Amino acid sequence: MIPTGRLWVLLCLLAVPMMAAGFFPGLGGAVLALDTLALALAALDFLMARRVRLEVSRQLPPRLSVGAPNKVELLLVHRGPRDVAVRLRDDVPESFTAEPEEAPLRLPADSQTRWVYRVTPAKRGRFGFGDVHVRVRGPLGLLLHERRVPAAQDVAVFPDMRGASRLLLSGAALDLVNLGLRQLRRDGRGSEFARLRDYAQGDSVREVDWKATARRTRPVTRVMESERSQSILICVDAGRSMAAQVDGLTKLDHAVNAALFLAFVAVRNGDRVGLAVFADGVKTYLPPAAGRGQYRKMVDALYSTTPSLTYVDYLALFKELNVRLTRRSLLSYLDLSFSGSGLINGGRLAGKIGEAIGDVAIDKLPVRYAAIATEIGTGHEIWITRGRLADAMRASYALPGIFSPVQIGERWLVDGALVNPVPVSVARALGARLVIAVNVNTDMFGRGTTIPDQGVVPVQEPEPPIEEEVASRGLFGLFGGEKSAKRRLFGTASRPGLSTVMVEAFNIMQDRITRARLAGDPPDILISPRVGRIGLFDFHRAQEAINLGAEAAERALEGLDEVITALA
């Protein structure tokens, strides 16, 4: 029961005759009657307000958008025979802002009334609406009867996807031509070939297809279009710096909204989109995939993402992504070069290594380090102990024939495994008392077995040169040259590729050298992971190799205490 302003005014008016009764005692009975009448009217007003029958229900969207006004509708059903004045207020979650917070309404007799207001959530996640508070004014306007209508309801607050909706509307407006005319092609400055057309004034000379021009005896221009079917990985920082507020939302909320908008555009254009949410480690990972189902997975994954009050470890992110590397994404690191001194130039891979470790010098490392390389021409075993770490690593893994040699100073260097696959001698020369070596060629033993009786069987016809294969396919050969080159490089199930032949030959030689070197200078502890079934280019199987290495290390280090005791 809440008194209204009208009741306070009535009480003030009744105070006048009460003061007059102090000077005129005969007015006491009249004042008492007036007070009794006022009290009776207030009680009657309250009872009539209490008897008003109201039904209240709330209608919410299936999903609310964070940082955006969302419509909420309250339906009031009045079954009484007279009009009723009410004041309505909804119990919204604490982090929500309601506009307006409450509203005075006039409910006609036996009617349904809808009140619409808007809420703006400040956080993502799952929240609960409470009950609806209604104050019913009596017919005399003296008292208000306050009641609580049970209406508890949960709601999910998702990232703001209004940008995607606006994009759909604008795309529909631009694609009206699809309703019956033809499909609209949007030519861009991409790198995918779309079609040939006659030269038009203003076309760049670089876009002229000179071969087609010679065949048609008139200028012909290549039309390129934006790349499609690309793999995109969106990384979202969820560290402590993303908890700061900007325009009513956290930085993480802004990043999530932008990530979803980018993902929507990419999925709509046919690209494969993935997601990585990270802080001190990778919290959520979705491998790249195409289709609307992938977009829904990203929305569900980002729905409950909150900032972690920890530091951000970018190195952990890159390690996790490297472990999840696929064979298709591996090809992006290989810059094939058939005109140099190696099938793979190696500049792209070296650039990635340089970006990861920076310009770190070997002599600035906290532990002593040496990279082993082999000099072309002399066969000298080169120990690289000074200079830029990334350059030393590149020279050390320059597999002959696969990667181009690396020039350091006046020397051209290739993989040091040609002369010293397991450099135990280098570790002892650097002052190590206890040498723990890793031999990755353990399960390659047996390559020297003699097969005394092998007959000659008919062989397959050799594949034609790439140039002839591309020329024989005509126009389609323009798009298959790269695929043919990669097939020749990596081979097929029935025929080994060029890289396979080189690597297998290198492994056979390395196995013989390793056994000879380890027999003459054995380490104190030898870790021998059986990774022979993992090829040189199987970087997408990194996690499998890591697990095999961990198992081998646990087995080999069981006798570490005995070795340390013997050396003490």
Image (tube, rainbow, N blue to C red):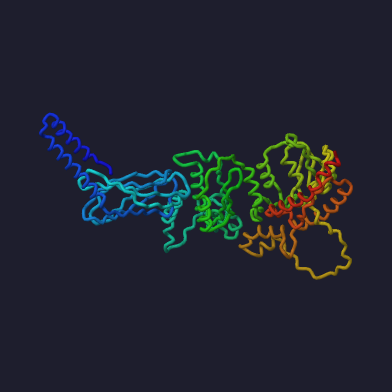
Q: Nearer the viewer, residue 481 or 219?
A: 481
Quarter-wise, where is residue 366 in the image? top right
Toward the top, the furthest residue is: 23
Instruction: Please say if 134 is above or below 27.
Output: below
Q: Position of residue 70 (x, y in %)?
A: 39, 49
Q: Is residue 383 left or right of residue 324?
A: right
Q: Position of residue 197 (x, y in %)?
A: 53, 58
Q: Nearer the viewer, residue 403 or 151?
A: 151
Q: Position of residue 527 (x, y in %)?
A: 79, 49
Answer whether residue 219 is visible to the viewer in this image. Answer: no
Report the residue at 69% width, 37% height from top. 359
Report the residue at 48% width, 39% height from top. 245
Q: Is residue 183 left or right of residue 496?
A: left
Answer whether residue 111 is visible to the viewer in this image. Answer: yes
Q: Position of residue 532 (x, y in %)?
A: 77, 56
Q: Nearer the viewer, residue 110 or 122?
A: 110
Instruction: State the quadrant of the N terminus.
Output: top left
Q: Nearer the viewer, residue 489 or 143?
A: 143
Quarter-wise, where is residue 13 in the image? top left
